[in-house]
Image (tube, grey):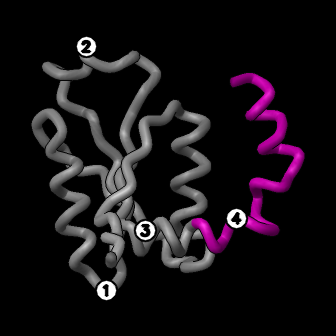
Amino acid sequence: MQQEEPKLVIFFVNADQLSALVLLSDYNRGSNQSITAPFGAACQSILFGYAEAEKDNPRGVIGFFDISQRKKVDREIISFTVPYKMFQEMESSVDGSFLDTHAWVQLQERQ
């Protein structure tokens, strides 16, 4: 039986976690163009993620900006959606990255 590969990975994160994901998304690319934060109604940011998945150099999508729907999630939570191939790229960058630094450890202590 062949296993399906996911299309997207969706994170529900606070500001510290979002900071790390944004940094990690461009860690090896160095383009400063690896994320987007378009406005969309409700969970439309997830649909933007599907569009990004079709691109050669997909971007992560920051979402949950719809004021009418914000009340349905914790006030500290925002979404970050990445195409699976971008997630794999980010995951391969973890070892030896800023996630091993004292600064990140300090941020984790306040979680």
Instruction: Name, please, the residue furthest toward the bottom.
Output: 56
Residue bearing mark 3: 34
Q: What residue type is labelled 2?
A: Lys
Q: Mark 2 points at which residue?
A: 71
What is the distance, in whole Å, between disc 2 and disc 1 at their CAs?
Answer: 35 Å
Q: Earlier in the sequence, mark 4 or mark 2?
A: 2
In this picture, is 89 found above or below 73?
Answer: below
The reply to whether the C-beta atoms of the residues labelled 4 and 2 are less than 8 Å apart is no
Which residue is disc 4 drawn over? 94
- 108 left or right, relative to 40: right
**Residue ID at (46%, 21%):** 76
Q: Which of 36 and 69 is in front in this view?
A: 69
Q: What segment carries the magenta color?
A: 91-111
Dot 3 or dot 2: first in sequence order is: 3
- Element class at badge 3: loop
Verify CB contact (< 8 Å) between mark 3 and mark 4.
no
Q: What amino acid is at disc 4?
A: Val
* Residue occupied by mark 1: 56
Foreground mark, 4 or 2, reads 4
First in sequence: mark 2 vs mark 1: 1
Q: Residue at x 19, y 57 (%)?
A: 48
Q: State left or right for residue 14 relative to residue 97.
A: left
